[in-house]
Image (cartoon, coloured by chain):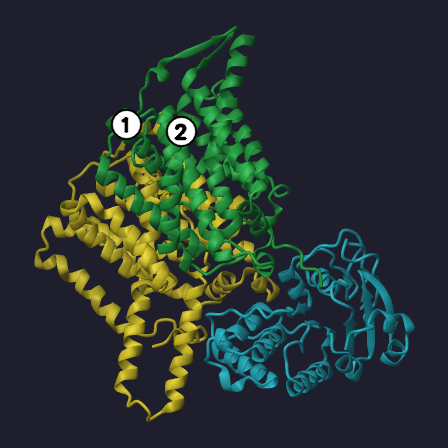
Chain colours: A green, B yellow, C cyan
Amino acid sequence: MSAADLLNLLIAALLLAGTYAAMSVGMTVIYGVMKIVNLAHAGFMMLGAYFVYELFSRFRLDPLVGVLLAFPTFFLIGVAVHWLLVRWIPASDQPTLSSLLLMFGLWLVLQNIGYLVWGNSDRSILTPRTLLTLHIGPINVPAVRLVVFLAAAGSLAALEFALHKTWFGRSVRALMQNRYAGRLVGINVERTARLTFGLGIAFAGAAGGLLAMLYSFSPDFGRAFLIRAFVIIVLGGLESFSGVAIGATILALVETFSILVLPAGYQPAIAFALLVVALVVLPGGVASLLTKRLRLA
Amino acid sequence: MSSAAESSGFARVRFRGAAPPVLLLSILIVLPLFGLGPNWTRLLFVTFVWITTSLAWNVLGGFAGQVSFGFAVFYGLGAYTAALSINAGINPYLAFLLAGITASTASLLVGLPTFRLRGPYFAIATIGVSEAVRVVMTNLAVTGGASGYRIVEHGAFRQIDHYYTALGLAGVALLVSLYIRGSKFGLGLIAIREDEEAAADAGVNPFTYKLSAHAVAAALTGIAGGVFARYAAYIHPHGVFAFHTSVAILLMPIIGGIGTIWGPVLGGAVYGLVQEELIANFPQIHLLLYGVFLILIILFEPGGIVGLLRKLFRWIEKARRDPGDHPTGASRDQVLWRAGRAQRREL
Amino acid sequence: MTKYFGGLAALKDVSFDVAAGGIYGLIGPNGAGKTTLFGIIAGSLAPTSGTVSFHGRDVTGVKSFQAVRAGIARTHQISRPFKSLSVLDNVTVGIRFGRGRVHGSANVRREAERILELVGLSHSTALPASTLCVGDQKRLELARTLAAKPDLLLCDEACSGLTDNEMVSVLELLCRICRLGTTVVFIEHNLKAIFSICDRVLVLNFGEKLAEGPPEQIQNDPSVIEAYIGKT
C-alpha cells in the first residue's frame, strides 16, 4: 500500500462522508423535533433514487437537477404523509414503539410501491460523468463522487443557514431542545412538526437521488443505508448536526479502510457491527437516549 | 371478557378456557388420518412453524415489551445447527434440541449488549445484529455461503412426520406461553413492559428477566428453524437469515394481537394459510398489505385481531343488556373502554 | 440504621442518620435534591461519592431491585402504576417480588386484598390501574411498595395533588404503617402535614443540608424560614 493509495482511500472516505451526512440529516431533524425514529426514511430514499432516475431516463435531465427538484417534491410528499398518518401518533418526549412500527409499516408500503412500479431489477444512472476520473497529482477522484460530495455539502450548508438564520429554523432548534417550552413561547408546534417532517423527507429523497448517482439500486435499496444513517446519528449524539458530520466521517473512514483487512463481502456488516458497538460502547455520547435524565427534586 | 379480567387471572388457574383449543388440537391431530393431501399438509406444516415463532416472539415482544426486529438470527442459527447436525448423523430430534440450545446461547450474546437500550433503540440494534449475522453467513464458506446448504437424510421422506413434529412444537410453544403468562416470571415480564424502572423499584430484576425471556423465545424460534430446515432440506442465508423473515416473525403476533396468547396463534395461522394464497395470486402486493395492516393496527387497534374481537364481544354484551337498566354497569364498561383507549395510546 | 451520603451535583455532602422506627420528613424548596436523595438510597441512582449503609451493611450503588431485597422501597413523585394490569395485580407484583414469603396463589391474593384494604382501595381491585384517579394511584403505589415488606419506606410527595381530606387519610395511613414496624421517610411540600406527624425533619436547600431536628426546632429555625419565604 503506497502513500498515494492511502491518500486516495482517505479522499474517497471523506467524499463518502459528505454523502452519508446528507443522508442522515433527514432522520436527525425528524427525530430531534418529534422523537420519531423514521424507518420509512429508507423508503423515501429509494423513491428519491427512482425519481431522479426517471427524470434522467425519460427527460434526459441531469441527475443533479433531478436532485434539486427532489427537494421540493419530497418536501410536499413529507408534509402530506405527516398530515395523513404521522400526526395521529401521540406526541412524546421519548421515542415510542408505536411511532417506530408505524414508520415501519409505511416503509413496507413504500417498498411495495417500488416493486409494483419498477420491478425488482437493479437500475443505475450512467452519465458521462460516471466514468470520468479526475487526476490531481497522485490523487484519482471519480468525478461523480466529487460532484455528489459538493451537492451534499451544499445542501448541508443550506440547512445550517436555514436553521440559524430563519425563524423556522429557530423554531426547529427550540423544539429539538424542549418541545413543551417551545409551545409556551408561542411556537406552533404542530405546524413546525409538519414542516420539519417535510424537510426530513425532502432530504431523504434528495439523498436517495445523490446515492443513486453512485450505486445501483432496487426497491430494497434503502435498508443498508438506513442502518448506516442510524450508526451515524448514534455516533454523533442523535440530536446535533455537527454530530452527524462526525459520525458520517467515522463511518466512512472505517468502511473505506476496512478493505485493507476484511474481504469485500463482509463490508456491509461493518455498519451493522458499528451500530451495535456505537449503541453499547458509547453511553457517554449518547447518554440522553440510553438513560432517563436525572430528575432533580 | 375484558382486559382487566384477563390480567387478574395471574394468581388463578393457568389453563382456563381450555376447551376450545383442546378441541382444535384434537381435530388437527386426527385430520391427516382422513387424508389431507400433500398440499394441505405442507400448508399446515408451515402454519405450525409460524405459530411457534409467533408465540415465541410474543414472549419477548408481547409479554416483556421488547420488540425485536432480528429474530431471523435465531431462526437461521437453528436451521443451520439442525442441518449441520443431521448431516453429521445426529438424530433429527436431538438436532432440533441442539438448534434450540444454539439459538438460546446466541440470544444471550445478543441480549447482553442490546438490552441496555430501550424501545426503538433496542429494535434498531436487533436489526443491526441480524443483518450482520446474515452477511457473515453469506460469506462463510464452511456452511455453503450464499449458495446455501443441503441436508442429506437417509430414509424415505414422510411428510406426515414433519406435520406432527411441527404440530407438537406449536403445542409446546402454546403450553410454554400459557405457563409463563400465569407465572411469577410472566408477571415480572409484564411489569417490565409497563414500566421497567418502576418494575425494578418494585423488586423485579429487569436484566435477568429480559435475558431469560429472550432465551426462551430464541430457543423456540431456533427449534422452529430446525424443524423447517429438515423439511425443506435446503436452506440459504437470504431465506432463513433474511430481514423479511424477521419482519414476518414480528408481524404475525402484532397483527394477531401482541401480548395475548391467541393473538400470535391467529396471526401465525392467518399468515401461514394466507401467505400461500397471496404469493400465488397477488405476489406483487403482499408487502403493501402487511404495511397497511400494520399502519391500521397502530393507528386504530393496537390490540390486533384479538383486540378487535374483544371489543366486538364487549359491544355485543353491552347491546344485549337493556340500556338504562344498569347505569353503574354501563358506566363501568365505559370506564373499561376508556381504559382500553388509554392503553392504546401507549404501545 | 445509619446512613451517610456524599456529593452529587444535586447533593453536596449531605449526611444524616435515620434511626429505626419513626417517621422522618424531608423538606426543601424545589430543586433542593430531595428526590435525588431518595433515588440514591433506593438504588435508582448511584452517588458520585459517599456511602449508604443500611442495617450495618454498605448498600451504596446497589440496583433498585436489590435495594428492595435489602428492605428499602420507594414510591415515586409522579405515580407509576403498571397501567394495563389490574389494581390487584399491581399489588401482586409487589408481593411476589418483595421480601414477604407469601406462597400459593390463594395466599398471594389474600395478602394483596389485605394491603389494598389497608390503603383504602378495596373497591377497585379489578379495575385496570390506568383508570384510577391521581389520589388512588398514589395509594396504589403505596400499596405496591408496602407489599414488598420494606423496613424503610421512602415516600415521595405522598400528598401532592390531593384534597385536604385525602391528605389526612394518607397521613393516617403513614402513621399506621409506621406503627406496624416500617420506618418512613417522606418528602412533602405541605409543612403542616410534615410537622404534624414527623419525629424528625431534614431540610435540604440547593443540595445541601440546611437543618435537621425535631419539628419544633425546625419550625423556629431562621434559616429554614428564610428559605421558605413566599412558600405555603
Q: Residue furthest front?
A: A166
Give the structural element (helix, strand or loop) at label 1.
loop
Label 1 amino acid?
Arg
Circles 1 and 2: CB distance less than 8 Å?
no
Q: Which residue is mark 2?
A: A210
Nearest the viewer among A28 and A269 is A28
Q: Quadrant of residue A179?
A: bottom right
Q: Secondary structure at mark 2?
A: helix
- Horizontal and vertical percent for residue A168? 53, 47
Quarter of the view holding residue A65: top left
Q: Quadrant of the C terminus of chain B?
A: bottom left
- Residue B9 seen anywhere in this rendered image of the structure: no
User: Where does residue A50 sit, x and y in percent of width and height?
Assistant: 30, 33
* Placement of C32 over or under B239, stated as above or below: below
Confirm whether residue C117 shows in the render.
yes
Label 1: how many Cα within 10 Å (few below 14, some 14–19, many 20+): some
User: Which residue occupies 48% across, 80% down?
Assistant: C106
- Marks 1 and 2 belong to one chain: yes
Residue of label 1: A123
Q: Chain of mark 2?
A: A
User: Badge 2: few (under 14), some or many (20 or more) residues near its Cα, within 10 Å?
Assistant: many
Q: In the rendered image of this protein, does residue B15 appear above or below residue A210?
A: below
**Quarter of the image with the N terminus of chain B in it:** bottom left
Q: Position of residue C227 (x, y in %)?
A: 84, 69
